[in-house]
Amino acid sequence: MKLATGDRTIRFLSTVFASMILLLIAVIVYELFKGSELSIGRFGLKFLVTTTWDPVNEVFGALPFIFGTIVSSVIALIIALPISIGIAVFLSELAPQAIRPSVSLMIELLAAIPSIIYGLWGLFVMVPFLQMYVEPVLSRYFGSIPLFGGVPIGVGMLAGGIILSIMIIPTIASISRDIFNTVPMLYKEAGFALGMTRWEVISKIVFPHSRSGLTGAVMLGFGRALGETMAVTMVIGNAPSISASLFAPSYTIASVIANEFTEATTKLYVSSLIELALILFAISMVFNAVARLLVSRERIVQ
Amino acid sequence: MSSLSYLKRRAVNSLMLVLSYGSAMFGVAVLLLILLYTMARGASAINWDFFVRLPRPTGESGGGIANAIVGSFVVVGVASAIAIPIGIMAGIYLAEFGKNRLAPVVRYFADVLNGIPSIVAGIVAYTMVVLPMHEFSAFSGGVALSLLMLPIITRTSEELLKTVPDTIREAALALGIPRWKVTIFIVLRTALTGIITGIMLAVARVGGETAPLLFTAFNNSFMSLRLDQPISTMTVLIYNYASSPYRDWNEIAWGTAFVLIAIVLVVNIVSKLFTKAKYAL
């Protein structure tokens, strides 16, 4: 009898604690909705398309921040994707066994560096470098394209995108590496037997086999970029404007919350910031939820 | 004709392989660049006083970050106290009692929760703890970090409990040991080293978080151990001092970054070596 009690207790307790994770998600959604009630009631769906952010007159719109968040993440992805795939190919197909673990470790360490350190490094090292060497050159040769127009001041969309790309490379690279590792050796050997070059085996056998997992890896990286706060806040310039230029300062959802939350004086102001958090939560949850499905499906095959 | 296309294929092959090598070198180079630069610049700001003194106003030399180091440990301690028991229990559930419909759902949402932007965790802790308490506090900072820690600990515990072979469970059960004792004293015990390593990694990860602490733990210029008062942390201090216009404060930010990065690196490398020794297959 006593025996069964102990068994039942641990089963019950562990079930309760596990259910707390589900409860937690519900609590997060509830708290965010409750906090943004005031702002949702006042602005409704117009909040999403308004470009004004004016705390003095209490007019709040999320569009510049949504724009900044998505564009900086897309830039990050454009830079990070080819490099990450390159690293994953190197780690799973090319690297000599002797150096594979240490290179893997170093790429994973890139993910372990706190984002505030990226921000610090970005602000004091990367931004001056961009301002002095990269942006003037780009604007001299491509200045007529709006993308590279404007004054090169270092901080801005380009700096934000680059720092984000460095931060998502380890995420995309390590998941892609794991996924490439699940491709059966037999398929690759069949390719080589047909006289394919190494790159042909990688691009025509390994990549197609990993397609859905790769999509998941990319979405996870993108989701991480969307929610990243400190590093971006320190280098993106923090101005709620929508500009075609990569050099122009911008603002992301996470950054505006980080910068203005403690200074928000009125209830509507706080509520608008919480609604921004709700939007960010919703976008990144969608990307995460889909990405997890894609990645786990691929891993089950293994 | 055919030899031309052969040459072209060879050329494409070489080019792509070189690019792949290049990407890996780029990744390693960026890591070394950031690490070495932070180490070199931070080292010059560090001396004994740095660890034992409180911050001084700008212009006065000789200040330290003792309160921020202590504060970081306090906040992470609160987070651990909340997240570790829940996480391990949830992990036990997933690994040991997870053959039902609820488990995959929990597992999936734990993964999804793992992707929650850290600033959102801060907002939730703010509305849940700071608003009712009417005060920024070390406790609310700990709550924010525990939200980020929980899914990591849950999934790590699960994965490691699952590495314990079923034969061990069966052997113990065959000896007549009740299931709950098997779970706690045999399965959990066997996986403990790995779980502790996983916890260390989770601690190092949330210890480097800044965003959720900005409006929960907030800031404090003095030494504080009280959970109901604002508290200084290393990460928030780096942010404040790096954004300030004063050069000497900027240097303190670099010094603090050095301390932070040293802790993170040591924990990561030690735990990697640990897991490798224990679970080398």
Image (cartoon, rainbow, N blue to C red):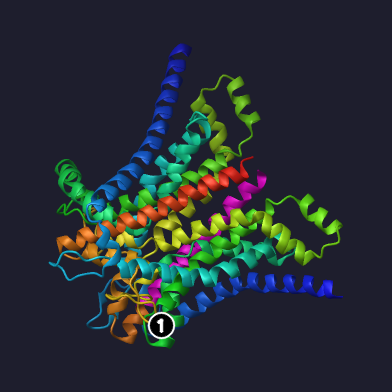
Residue B19, horizontal then vertical, whole percent: 39, 31
Task: Please provide the residue range marked out in magenta.
Answer: A273-302
Residue at the outermost left position: B59
Apparent side of residue A290 relative to residue A223 in the rendered image (left or right): right
Magenta stretch encompasses residue A291: yes
Magenta stretch encompasses residue B184: no
Q: Amino acid at mark 1?
A: Asp
| Main secondary structure of the magenta stretch | helix
Q: Quadrant location of residue B109?
A: bottom right
Question: In terms of depth relative to the viewer, which is nearer, A299 or A9?
Answer: A9
Give the chain letter at badge 1. Answer: B
Q: Quadrant location of residue B144?
A: bottom left
Q: Which residue was labeled with disc 1?
A: B228
- Looking at the image, residue B128 lies above or below residue A116: below
- Looking at the image, residue A265 lies above or below residue B40: below
> Which residue occupies 16% across, 42% down?
A137
Question: In terms of depth relative to the viewer, which is nearer, B228 or A114?
Answer: B228
Apparent side of residue A62 relative to residue B246 in the rendered image (left or right): right
Q: What secondary structure is marked by label 1? A: loop
The N terminus of chain A sits in image quarter: bottom right
In this view of the protein, can residue A268 be seen by the observer?
A: yes
Residue A44, horizontal then vertical, whole percent: 40, 80
In this view of the protein, can residue A60 be seen by the observer?
A: no
> Which residue occupies 79% across, 50% down?
B167
Total marks placed? 1
- Looking at the image, residue A115 lies above or below residue B226: above
Apparent side of residue A246 relative to residue B102 in the rendered image (left or right): left
The C terminus of chain A sits in image quarter: top right
Question: In terms of depth relative to the viewer, which is nearer, A49 or A93?
Answer: A93
Residue A228, horizontal then vertical, whole percent: 38, 60
Q: Quadrant location of residue B110?
A: bottom right
